[in-house]
Image (spheres, rainbow, N blue to C red):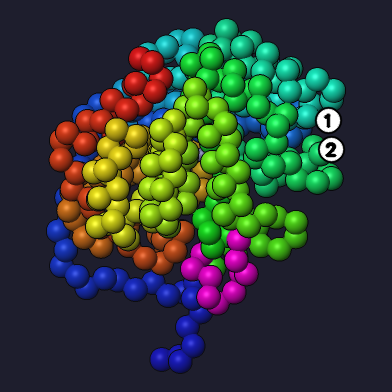
Amino acid sequence: MSARLPLNEFDPRSMLQARVTKIEKSRFPAIDIHTHLSWGDVLAGEQKVTQIATPEEILAVMDRKNIRLMVNLTGGYGKGLEECVRYWSGRHPERFLIFTEPWYSRIAEAGYAQFQADELERARKAGARGVKILMTLGLGLREKVTSGRLIKVDDPRFDPMWEAAGALGMPVAIHTSAPEAFFLPVDRYNERYEELAAHPDWSFHGGDFPAERELEEARNRVTARHPRTQFLVLHVGLAENLGYMSSCLDRYPNMLVEFGARISELGRQFRTARKFFDKYQDRILFGTDAVPHGEKEYPQQVFSDGLYEIYYRFLETEDEYFDYSTAPTPPQGRWRIYGLGLPDGILRKVYHDNAARLLGL
Ligand SMILES: [Zn+2]
């Protein structure tokens, strides 16, 4: 026996004889509000999105897993958006909805603020149902698009866009920040060490990156400034700190949350999470952040039957100590999760009704 075992070779098998409940279909028809069925490069300035799956292969899983509707958040802008709407919603308008993204590459141009607000209206007419903000805003977009000073989430140039979103009835699905550990040194104390070692570009430690809380607060200021606009905070915002997120939800009635790729956080603080779901049951939306064929980059959110079964198990059962991912090694940290065992009344809202209301269905 070697006294030193490399971490990546450590593969312990739990000896717990814990209950295993297989949930093949969600208890109520679900709306997955957070998926990526296409990608563009939002900083490249091209009106191009690449479809990463076909409607047929996605529909097969949806039907097996009781998913009524999927929202593809990364639908791009301009011609790319039109193409995306046609490709997904054209043939299956009842099953796929598309969100648009800001045209960031024009940020340096005079009159951008109004252009972007007008662009939203064009996107709405083209069929987009909401706006998606990647963490590009706050952590990637710079004054000269890819160089210069980082542009803040609450930069006033976006005010007309946030306001237009509210006026057009387009919810804003916003991903600001990242797990708090991504802002800390990548060392032996970092609970996301393995994940950051696999994706060094996910670290926002050092450089000119803002602190984690600064990003959250900038998003809060935007939410406060535009009370008519609905802000859907993706990944529960800061899922590691539900006390903080509760204070945000209490302050801003136009804020909602979605928990894609964060059952790993919620499920290891299941008592607190259970109370959170109880208190905010009208403002929590089901989402997975699913990416088809994303095995390499996004092991915790590869679109598959198995992914949905884990989410359903987490929401519906009181099973203990189970994997939050289909990946062989827990990709976000070496821990396991516990189910919330939510009652029907909350499940119905979280799976479906809250999203249906937000999307105006
Ligand atoms: Zn996402």
- Which image quarter: residue 48? top right
Residue on which the image places disc 1: 108
Residue on which the image places disc 2: 144
Q: Is residue 187 left or right of residue 300?
A: right
Q: Is residue 44 above or below residue 358?
A: below
Q: Identity of the amino acid at label 2? A: Lys
Q: Is residue 97 left or right of residue 353?
A: right
Q: CA distance from mark 2 to mark 1?
A: 6 Å
Q: Are marks 2 and 1 in contact (CB under 8 Å)?
A: yes
Q: Percent x, y for residue 86?
A: 54, 12
Q: Percent x, y for residue 334?
A: 41, 67
- Which image quarter: residue 152? top right
Callout 2: helix, strand or loop? Answer: loop
Range of residues picked out in magenta: 183-192
Q: Name the residue nearer the viewer: 258 or 223.
A: 223
Of the 4 image quadrants, the one containing the C terminus is top left
Q: Percent x, y for residue 24?
A: 22, 38
Callout 1: helix, strand or loop? Answer: loop
Badge 1 crowding class, 10 Å Cα cut-off, few under 14, some 14 to 19, many 20 or more, is few
Q: Residue at x 39, y 23 (%)?
A: 358
Magenta span: chief secondary structure: loop
Verify whether residue 187 appears in magenta.
yes
Q: Can residue 30 be seen at all in this image of the molecule?
A: no
Q: Can residue 222 be seen at all in this image of the molecule?
A: yes
Q: Identity of the amino acid at label 1? A: Ala
Q: Name the residue nearer the viewer: 242 or 144.
A: 242
Q: Residue at x 84, y 45 (%)?
A: 148
